[in-house]
Image (cartoon, rainbow, N blue to C red):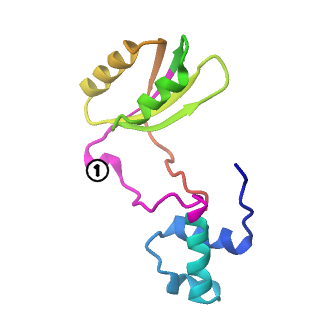
Amino acid sequence: MSLMVIDKIDEKILKNLMVDARLSARQMALKLGMSTVTVLSRIKKLEKEKIIKGYTAIIDHEKLGYDLTAIIEIIAKKDIIDIEEKLSKIENVCGVYDITGNTDTIIVAKFKERNELSKFVKTLSSMPNVENTITHVVLNTAKEDFRIT
């Protein structure tokens, strides 16, 4: 896999899209002082190279009833990649991270009710090759924004 080299213009386009993905190419071109065609062609290139994977809205999960955020450590016996692939397909799971240290994987998941979290952890613990889980419940979220702006 070769890395695409991006320049300062690409960076500016990406930062603008991270702040407002609804910004039109024309609006961005005016803002950056370049032609709409240039902005469009660069966006297409970034999409083709999968640097831009898609466009989405930033949601306030708590306003949708997802009041519980859990960070769960998983210690596996083996086949951690298989476990991570299964976890990635579960609706409540927001992030799956293969990490260094004593823990093999960290997942971040959101739940509406405590019993949903309880059921999820019990299901997780009973998965083949999951040796142990350690669940942390988030008390307060100081920041939750994966955009680099």
Position in image of residue 26 (x %, y %) = 51, 87
Residue 45 magenta-drawn? no
Q: Which residues lie in the magenta part? A: 48-73
Number of numbered markers: 1
Question: Is 88 drawn above or below residue 56 in the view shown?
Answer: above
Position in image of residue 42 (x %, y %) = 62, 75
Q: Is residue 30 visible?
A: no
Please identify the quadrant where the C terminus is shown: bottom right
Residue 58 magenta-drawn? yes
Question: Is 1 drawn above or below residue 148 in the view shown?
Answer: above
Q: Amino acid at mark 1?
A: Lys
Q: Residue at x 47, y 16 (%)?
A: 133
Position in image of residue 14 (x %, y %) = 60, 67
- Label 1 crowd (10 A; few <14 / some 14-19 / many >=20): few
Pointer 1 residue: 63
Question: Is 139 drawn above or below residue 123 in the view shown?
Answer: below
In this rendering, position of residue 142 left or right of residue 29: left
Q: Residue at x 34, y 48 (%)?
A: 61
Q: Which of the 4 quarters of the picture holds residue 122?
A: top left
Q: Is residue 14 visible?
A: yes
Task: Classify mark 1: helix, strand or loop.
Answer: helix
